[in-house]
Image (tube, rainbow, N blue to C red):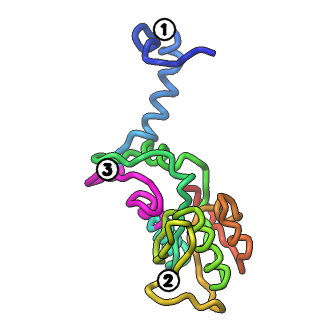
Amino acid sequence: RVLMSAVYDRNPDPQAVSLLRPYKEKVDSIMCPVIGHAQEKLTAYRPESPLSNLIADLLRESAGRRLGVKPEVGIMNMGGIRNIMNRGAITIGEVYEICPFQNALAIVTLRGDALLELFGQIAALHGEGLSGAKLVISKEGKLLSARVDDQPIDPGKEYRVATIDYVAAGNDHMEAFKKAVRTVEPENSVL
């Protein structure tokens, strides 16, 4: 094993720098443009956090634009968030550092009973990124109450949930997604 550290930056190999220059320029042209500004540093933590909830909000908004109808709930798994959003300029590269996996947007329709089961699974995980719903979770990870759009969940009603394809497949301990009435993954919706 060779430890990769700043020691290699002190005397860069001119041939290696020359060889990599066109690739670096191409990657930088894609990853370095500023696409927004954050007024404060956002981090991700359980049971919920500004960054995880922002991503869940963005999933709902994106799904709404694609479907013409905004899903009632948005869910982002904490395991899919791999970095913080620093205060200041936001680049495309920083967005990729936050959500580095090639996930796609998925809109899952669940009956209310399956949605309650899903919320119970989220409670057992002590929270995930959430939009459009309010969960009350005990310290032991039990779901005490759940509401969507400030209303109790109707077990027979269908609810749309915006998430990522990985989670929609029932991964990351959210098996209730496997009870989907239907799942839609819009074309060209890789996040």
Is mark 3 in CB contact (under 8 Å) with mark 2?
no
What amino acid type should be assigned to the residue bearing mark 1? Asp
Task: Decide if residue 1 is on the left or right side of residue 150.
Answer: right
Q: Considering the numbered disc 1 on the image, is that residue within a helix, a strand or a loop?
A: loop
Coordinates of residue 153 in the picture (x, y in percent): 56, 87
Image quarter (top left, top right, bottom left or bottom right) of the N terminus = top right
**Where is residue 175, by image quadrant?**
bottom right
| Residue 186 seen by the camera | yes
* Residue found at x 39% / y 39%: 32
Amino acid type of the residue that numbered disc 3 sits on in the rendered structure? Lys
* Alpha carbons under labels 3 and 2: distance apart: 28 Å
Badge 3 local density, few (<14 within 10 Å), some, or many (20+)?
A: few
- Which residues, given as a range, are shown in magenta? 35-56
Between residue 117 and residue 16, name the one nearer to us: 117
Q: Residue at 49% of width from left, 14% of height from top?
A: 18
Instruction: Residue at 45% x, 48% y: name it.
Output: 95
Q: Nearer the viewer, mark 1 or mark 3?
A: 3
Q: Quadrant of the C terminus?
A: bottom right
